[in-house]
Amino acid sequence: MTSRSSKVTARPSSEARAVARTQTLIKGLNGIGTVRKTTLPGGLRIVTETLPSVRSATFGIWAHVGSRDETPSLNGATHYLEHLLFKGTQRRSALDISSALDAVGGEMNAFTAKEYTCYYARVLDTDLPLAIDVVCDMLTGSLILEEDVNVERGAILEEIAMTEDDPSDCVHDLFAHTMFGDNPLGRPVLGTVDTVNALTADRIRRFYKKHYDPTHLVVACAGNIDHNKVVRLVRAAFEQAGALKDAAAQPIAPREGRRALRTAGRVELIGRKTEQAHVVLGMPGLARTDDRRWALGVLNTALGGGMSSRLFQEVREKRGLAYSVYSYTSGFADCGLFGVYAGCRPSQVHDVLKICRDELDHVAEHGLSDDEIDRAIGQLRGSTVLGLEDTGALMNRIGKSELCWGEQMSVDDMLARIAAVTPEDVRAVARDILGQRPSLSVIGPLKDKQASRLHDAVA
């Protein structure tokens, strides 16, 4: 069994000190908003966005691995690994990792998605070197000890139980399964009780070594920072860990994926003794690289993106049938989802589903009014800017853009793409997406007669 120590890795070879490649991707006014990228020998990419007007910085490392990369028996391994990287390295114990950031008032966390994982820390700008050292140490030097795997297993099982206790959350996992079936995109990110119990330290270590190579990683940093300093600190941390061994290695390309199986007219019901029935009615959406995604964003906003949206007005304001009702989109490398969620009393579920289906059909056939589209464009432009008002959001934007698209888009360019959406663009994507036969996922205490009528919503 490996033990923790303070041993420092030998200095890198001259080959690993090869020249890095740096480029400016977005040039901001007086440096504000400038996005730069450096690719280190060894394939590690570092992107930064400078915002001198703030006193904070957010540092993150994105890994090109998510639950989509798991085999059935490894379901949950990516999320399990996310937990374990906080449990200790050769240089730090789990307490050392958490206390280092706590001591300077910083925040540290991570999240796992279907196609990527991110680890990040937000600190005062003066404490950025500490954040870089800690997060890089976690990503390059995790021990993944058997004792830590066994302890963390209990925490993950509790997280699964907590999610299952919230039907408004797990109905979205059910919808993914309804749409994709027994495909990696259809399996839960957390895994299941059975798969988590079956995972061993050895299997997780192999998964770690395979997917956390520098060529699979993107470092992102935003705030009151200096790009060159960030590059020096990151390079030093990775070289100290011996992680940049192959100077000729190149970053992997953005994920292309294999088109997942998509279904229509399926209904899945999980009976539970809940006060509400939780439903998701939806259909295939668009891949995240599809140029029509801007029009779909406008359509989604007008349909279920706010208090003035059609679904909110029809279901809640006019009839009071639900407290929460909204629509959403999810884009993956090769496919996507469009869904409508509502939570209502079980006795009202068929009325809610009929109204939602009628609205989707009406918009598919007749489109939205110009006023609705103009309002949605304004709402989407405003929410886009307001959602990027902190260094954490900026770090997310540039890190995910590099990992998923391999390019950066300025906020002005994003706003221009949204503003350029025409009514006909929205009507066309409404016909394409909403004109498909939907599928339905439901969690709630529906009786047999109620359950038998659910197929009416997808007929």
Image (tube, rainbow, N blue to C red):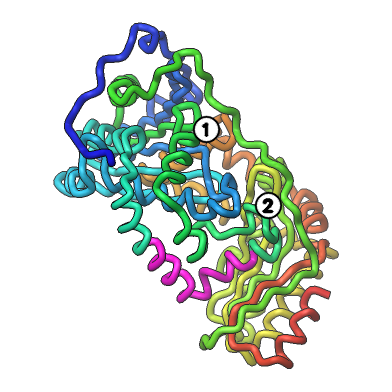
Kindly identify the residue that appears in the image at 21 percent across and 24 percent down: 8
Residue that badge 1 annotates? 402
Measured as percent of width and height from the top left, residue 386 is found at: 45, 50
Amino acid type assigned to the residue bearing label 2 in the image: Gly
Q: In this view, does 227 lie above or below 61?
A: above
Residue 171, above or below 141: below
Q: Please say if the residues under marks 2 and 1 sit with CB atoms less than 8 Å apart.
A: no
Query: Is-magenta flag for residue 176?
Result: no
Helix, strand or loop status at disc 2: strand
Mark 1 Cα-neighbour bin, 10 Å: few <14, some 14–19, many ≥20: many
Q: Give the range drawn in magenta.
A: 156-175
Residue beneath disc 2? 336
**Vertical position of residue 356 compared to residue 147: above or below:** below
Q: In this view, does 358 lie to the left or right of 112?
A: right
Tally the marks: 2
Q: Where is residue 71 in the image (x, y as percent from the top left)?
A: 59, 49
Residue farthest to the front, as pictured: 1
Is 222 positioned to the left or the right of 416 in the image? left
Please indicate whether residue 76 sits to the left or right of residue 325 in the image: left
**First of labels 2, 1 by sequence position:** 2
The mark found on residue 204 in the picture is none
**Residue located at (74% from left, 81% from top):** 454
Compare residues 168 and 431 and report the one nearer the observer. 168
Residue 457 makes an appearance in the image: yes
